[in-house]
Amino acid sequence: MAIKQISVFIPNQKGSLGNLTYIFYTSHIDIRALSVYDTLEYGILRAVVDKPEEAVQVLKDNGLVAKISTVLAVNPEDEKGSLSRIFNILGDNDINIDYIYSFVAKEEDEQYFVLKVGDVARAEALLEQNAIRVKKEL
């Protein structure tokens, strides 16, 4: 089972990230992973949080545009070539990776890579068939 990620459009201006993370803080939402991509006028924040549905509602209540999508969190072996192996398994099976970012799960002290792919269920099955650990929940 894949995990849920939220995506939020935020203004590309001073204080936007502070405001958004303060909303999470006051709503008791824990950020597990975070990535921000910017353009001239706005940024796209992608986050894995402990309560994604609640997070989206709180953000919408605060005038922000947010949505939930499904992503994979994979935990490759800590050895050279492990990411290449994952990327080649997916590429050889015509599964494109739209984007990727990483985080460390503090409870496990393990590094994970979040992958946004077109066919999450098929990618997850392929990776597990090839002994790649896929995180089931955060």
Image (cartoon, rainbow, N blue to C red):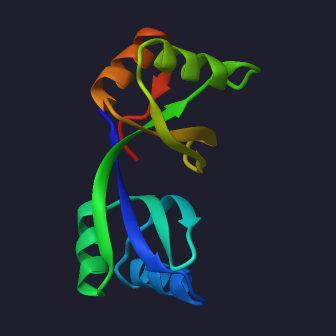
Q: Residue at x 56, y 39 (%)?
A: 112
Residue 40, quarter of the rendered image: bottom right
Residue 39 in picture, x, y percent from top left: 56, 70
Image position of 60 (left or right of 43)? left
Which residue is drawn at the image coordinates 29% and 32% (left, top)? 1
Among the 4 quarters of the image, the one containing residue 124: top left
Asked whether, in this view, residue 59 is left or right of residue 81, the answer is left
**Residue 123 x %, y %:** 38, 23
90, above or below 12, in the image: above
Q: Where is residue 9 in the image (x, y as percent from the top left)?
A: 40, 72
Across and down, in percent, residue 74 comes to 50, 32
Q: Is residue 54 left or right of residue 99?
A: left
- Please identify the residue farthest to the right as the structure is shown: 80
- Point 60% across, 26% down: residue: 76
Query: What's the residue at 48%, 34% (across, down)?
Result: 97
Report which quarter residue 17 is drawn in: bottom right
Q: Foreground residue, 113 or 91?
A: 91
Q: In this view, does 34 lie above or below 103?
A: below
Nearer the observer, 110 or 60? 60
Whether residue 40 is situated above or below residue 85 in the rendered picture: below
30 or 118: nearer the viewer: 118
